[in-house]
Amino acid sequence: MSDNQTYEKLQKLMHSYVPEFAYEHGASDPGCVLTDLCGTMMEESRERYGKVIPRHRIQYLNLFEHLLKEPVSASRAYVQFRPVSGYEGKVAIPAGTQVLSPSSEAGDIVFQTEHGMTISDTAPELIVVTDREQDRIIKRNYSEQNPTSFRAFGTEGVNCTVHQLYLCFENLFDWMSGLDLFLQVQAGGEEDQDRLLKFLTGDQVRWSMLETDGEERTFTTVEETDGRIHLLLPDYQPQKAMVGQKEGYYLVLTCLEGVQDLYIRSLSLTFAGENKVPEEVYLNGNEEPAGNFLPFGKPLGLYNECSIDDREVLSRRGAKVSMSFLLNYRIHEEKLELPEMELEYKAIMKKPREQLNVRPAEVLADYVCWEYLSETGWKRLLKDERTGTMFNGSVEGPMTIEFICPEDMAEYDPERRSGRIRLRLLQAENIYRMPAIYKCPVMAGLSFSYTYEQEMQLPVWAMTRNNFEEKNITEDLRSQGVVNLFYETEHRRRTMYLGFSGSVAGTPLSLYFDIENYGDRPISFQVEYLSSRGFQPVKTADYTDGFSGSGNLLLMIPDDIQKTTKFGYEGYFLRFINYNRENPEHALPVIHGIYPNMARVANVNTVTEEFYLEDEEAAVHIQLSQQNLLKAEVFVREQTEEGEEWIPWRQSSRSVENGRSCQLDMASGELFFRKHQFSGFRLAEEGPHIRVLHSNYSGSVANVPAGAITIPGTAIRYLSEVTNPFPAYGGYDGYTEETAMRLVSGMLRTRNRAVTRKDFAELIAQESYGIRKVKCVNQMNQITIAVLVEEYEKGAHVFSGIKKAIRDRLLRDSALMPSGKSLTLIQPHFIRMNVRVWLEKDSMDQAYDLQQRALAKMTDFINPLKGGVSGQGWEIGELPRASQLTAVLRTGLPGCSITRMVITAQVNGQEYSVTDEFYENLNDPFAMAVNGEHMVYIEVSGC
C-alpha cells in the first residue's frame, strides 16, 4: 500500500464518522495534523512489518547453507605455451605454473596450470582419414593459423586412394603413330587365369598411357583375344614420362573399384606392324622414291650404297623385322666408241675392210654387303652369303629378308641424310670393261613388317602403387615370381593420422581439440606413434571423453618416434584407431581446431603460509593473506615416534568438536582454533607449528577474453610466449538471494531425486552455475538432455568443462540407473540464422538510426537467452518465425513498413532458405537459433 492510498483510506473513514469534516492532507488544521500523524504511524508500521518476511526468508535460506555447494569454483581457460621458434629441444611446463592476465581494475589476475606437459615447436600440418572397407583415403592440409573445421574420422572429401600398376618401356614405342598391343598375363595359379583375364578386361580397371604432363590417355579398346589382352589406341603418338627417377613409356593399369587379390606370375607385351613403307631411301646421299628405285644406280657403281630408314620399324630393338620387295632388273648398255677410218681409193679398187666388232661384257652386282648403323658405327646386319649374292641376277621376283633388329641400333636422327640400314656394292666383275651390259637391280614395293611374337617384351621397370606405398616388382616379373598387384595398405579399422613437421616426443605432449559433438556419441579410439618398430601404442589421458567435447589429450610419446614419408608427406606421425562399429557421418564430432602445447588453467593463486604458536592453550585466530578461498589445507607440526611431521587437520563446522579439527571461514580467510585444541598433541618444540596451503580466485572479473593471458608467472628457459586462444569462463561472485532461493526450493521439492524434466533442470542448476535452458527427450532406451549455458558464445569448451560434473550428478541423483536407460548430454544444435530485411520510409531522415534500431531488435529477438516475444529467451527446439520477427519490427519501428524479408539458416555447413518447408523438414528437437549476419536496407517511398 502506498502513502496516497493510506491517506485516501483515512479520509473515507473520517467522512463515514464526521461527514462535515473537511480533511486536507498537509493542512495546518489540528484535525488534519492528527490525521496525518496517524497515517504516518500506520505507514511506518507497514514498512516495519514488511521487512519481517524478507528477513525471515533470508534466515530460512541460511539454514540450508551447509547443503548448498557453489557449483563453479573459479574461472577456467586453456593457455597455449610457445617455445622459441626453431628450438629443437623440449621445454617442460610443470603443473602449478602460473600465468597472469594484466588488468587495470583488479591488477594481475593469476591463473595456474592444472597439469604438466612438454612443449615443442611443432604443430599438425596434415590430417588423413583412412577407411579400408570403403577403400577411401581423405587427405587434408592443416594450418594452426587458419584452421578449417572437419569431422573426426570423417570420409567426406576427395578420395586419394590409388591402386595402379606401372610398366615402363624405354624405347619400345619410339615413333609409333598408333598403339595396337597384346598383353600376355599369367596368373599365379592356373585356376585363377580366367578370373584374372576377366578382371583385367572389365569395367573395374582402366588401361592407359601416361603422358609427359602426368595426364593419362585411355585405350579405346580393351578386350580378351585368344587368351591375351588386346589394347588398341589408334592415331596416338606415345610420349615419354617420368615416374620417380625413371623415364620411359608407361603403360598404366588402374583399379577403379573392388580391389581384389590379383596374383600374377608373368607379364609381357607384344605387338606387330605390317606393310610399312620406309620413310627414307637414299642413293649415295640422294633421296630416292621408296616405291621403285635402283639401289646401286644405273649403271652400277662399285661401292655405291643404298640406305634405308624408318623411324618406327628400325626403333623396334629386339623385334623380328621382315623386309619385302619385288626384285627385277633393268638392262643398261654401255658401248665402246671406235674412231672411223678414212678410205683411200687407188687406181686399183680393193674391197673395203670390215669394222672391228668388240663383244660387250656383262656386269652384275656380284656381292652386296648388308649393314646397320650401330651406336658405335656401321656393322654387318646379315651374314648369310645368299643375301649378299641375291642381286647377281640369279633370282628375281618377290623377296623377303628377315632379321632381328639389333639392340645397339642407333637412334633416329632426322638431320642425318642416310638411313640406318645400307646395301653397299662391294663386288661387280667387269665393271670397268667397255663395252658392257649392266644388269641393274630394281627394288619395287619395298615395305617393312615387324613382330615381337617370338621375343616377348618385358618391361624394363615395373612398379605397383597402392595408395602411397610404391613397390618395385621388376625382378619378380623377370624371375616369374608371384606378385600381388593390388592390395590394401591401411589399417582394417577407420583411422585418422596427424602429421607433424617436428618431433612430438614428450612426457606428456598436450594436444587440445576444439570439438562440437552434437550427437554426443563418444569414439573409442587408441593412439599410436610411428617408431622404427612400426606403429606402437601410446599411453594417453583423454579429457575429451572420446571426442565428446573440447579438451586436452595428454600423450606419453617416447623419444624413438621416427621421421618417415607417408601419404606423400615427410614428418612424424600419430594415428588414432577408431574401434566404433558404426560411424555415421552426421554423428561424427566436428573438430574446429587442433592446438598443441595447451594446458588447462584455473583462476587459482596458491599460497603457502606458516605460523608460530606462542600459547598452545589459548584460542588461536589467524588472518590468512587471501580471501574468497577456493580450497585450503591445514597442517600442524607434531612430534611423532618417527620424528617431527606435518599432520593434516580437518576443517569442522562446529567449534566444539574435539580432535584434529579447526574452523576456517573461506570467504574472509580467517582460521580459528578453540581453547585447549592442541592439548593431547605433542607439538614440535622449534620452528613453525601451523602450515596453511590455500588458494583463492578473482570471481567474474577473471572471465577474461581471448588473448588476455599473456604473462608467464615464472621465468622458463626457451619459452617465447603464452596466450589463451579462447575466452576464460565459469568465474562468478557467489550466490545471490535469487539463485539461493531457486536452488533451495528445487532441493526441497526434488529431495535431490530427479524424475521430471523440471527436476533434471534443477539438479543441473545445483551442479553448475550459469545454466539457462534445459530440455529432456525421453526415448526408448535413453534420455537425451540438452543444456544451454550462459556463456555458450565463448565456444564448445565451456560446455565441455562442466559436462562431466553434470553427467555424474544426474547419474547419481536421478531415476536413470534404476530404469536402465542411458544418458546422453549435449548442447543445443545451434543454427545460425541470417536475416535481410527491406524497410520503406517516407524520407531518409534518421535512416541510419532506424537501421541500427532494426539491427538491434533483430539481434535481441533471435538471442537464445533474452530473445523471443516475451524477452525471456527461446526454449530449446523452438525456432523464430518470420511472422514473429515481422510483428516485432512493425511494433518497435513506427513510421516505416516492411516490404520484404529473407531469412536463411546454416545447417551442417549448408545454407537453406527458411520457409514453411524448412520447418517441416527440420525434425530436430534440440535446434536453437543464434544470430548470424543481418542486413537492413532502407528504401524511400516514391523514389
Image (cartoon, rainbow, N blue to C red):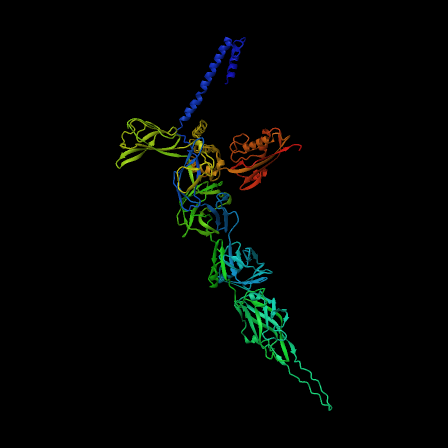
Q: Is residue 924 above or below residue 174?
A: above
Residue 315: give x, y in percent of width and height: 55, 65
Q: Nearer the viewer, residue 167 or 35?
A: 167
Above or below residue 860? Residue 345 is below
Residue 562 percent across, percent down from the top left: 42, 51
Q: Position of residue 190 (x, y in %)?
A: 49, 63
Q: Quadrant of residue 316?
A: bottom right
User: Is 627 in front, or is 309?
Assistant: 309
Number of callouts in the render?
Answer: 0
Q: Residue 179 is drawn in which quadrant?
A: bottom right
Q: Is residue 59 left or right of residue 156?
A: left
- Which residue reaches farthest left? 641
Image quadrant occupied by the C terminus: top right
**In front: 402, or 847?**
847
- Which residue appears farthest toward the bottom when viewing the image? 348
State whether residue 123 appears in this view: yes
> Which residue, as the protein is rendered here, is positioned at the far right?
347
Percent across and percent down for residue 613 are: 30, 29
Say if 553 sits above or below 379 in the image.
above
Residue 783 visible in the picture: no
